Amino acid sequence: QSALTQPASVSGSPGQSITISCTGTSSDVGTYNLVSWYQQYPGKAPKLMIYEGSKRPSGVSNRFSGSKSGNTASLTISGLQAEDEADYYCCSYAGSGTFYVFGTGTKVTVL
Amino acid sequence: EVQLVESGGGLVQPGRSLRLSCTASGFNFGDYAMSWFRQAPGKGLEWVGFIRGKAYGGTTEYAASVKGRFTISRDDPKSMAYLQMNSLKTEDTAVYYCTRAFEGDYWGQGTLVTVSS
């Protein structure tokens, strides 16, 4: 099972909106609405930002939203803030056998 | 407050074994699946495996890269989860994270496992 494809880097200015894509296949993203997104600061543990495609855990800012179209899931960060600068990973359920596959990771830079 | 604390990491030679522990607090441990993830130095995240809650038989599932070598277990009265790692390889070197639930809604701080001769 190959990793999900994410852009290596995405950047934006404060206040702007950015979108991170996560491209999989019909065996994972395309079939299951079970994509999660994680935020990770250097040297820190990841934090769950989105689960089941578009749901936000309690305490996560509503500036973060998730969606899906076909085999591609997306994470949108609106009203970009300096604190959003971090690495972001997507993860999709891929059925029994493989179970979970991660994306390659995207570094978000706030200009 | 939900807290997860991993322990047991360290330097181990290839082919040897190591057991990681995860101490949980702040929630009803037995009601949740527990998962393990890892991250090699400078690399991305990788799912290792999970153990279902008692209500679902406490059964386990593993990534292909560790299946047959790693075993996840749990002790609900102690609110602890374990990751037994056998036949360790250099490519198992990583920070190992214990998380709550399948998607990891809470994460521990991680423990570093270095496999090297």
Image (cartoon, coloured by chain):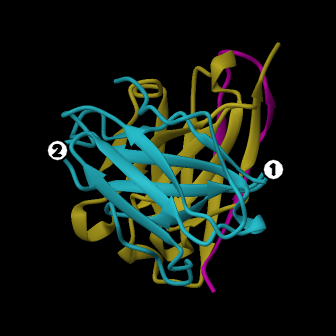
Chain colours: A cyan, B yellow
Instruction: Say if A11 sits above or below A94 in the image.
Output: below
SS at badge 2:
loop
Residue B21 occupies quadrant: bottom right
Q: Over which residues does the magenta segment extend?
A: B1-20
Which label's residue is closer to the chain start, 1 or 2?
2
Pointer 2 chain? A
Residue type, mark 2 in image: Thr
Can I make out residue B36 in this image?
yes
| Residue A30, horizontal then vertical, whole percent | 21, 42
Instruction: Say if B35 sits above or below B90 in the image.
Output: below
Q: Residues within 10 Å of mark 2 (few under 14, many from 20)?
A: some
Image disc number at residue A108 = none
Image disc number at residue A31 = 2
Q: Residue at x 71, y 69 (%)?
A: A81
Q: Residue at x 49, y 76 (%)?
A: B77
Q: Is residue B77 left or right of residue B9?
A: left
Quadrant assignment for the N terminus of chain A: top left
| Residue A109, horizontal then vertical, whole percent | 73, 50
Are discs 1 and 2 located on one and the same chain?
yes
The residue identified by callout 1 is A43
Q: Residues within 10 Å of mark 1 (few under 14, many from 20)?
A: few
Q: Residue at x 78, y 54 (%)?
A: A111
Q: Distance of mark 1 from mark 2, alpha carbons?
A: 33 Å
Residue B8 within the magenta-colored segment of the rendering: yes
In this rendering, the label closer to the viewer, 1 or 2: 2
Residue A95 within the magenta-colored segment of the rendering: no
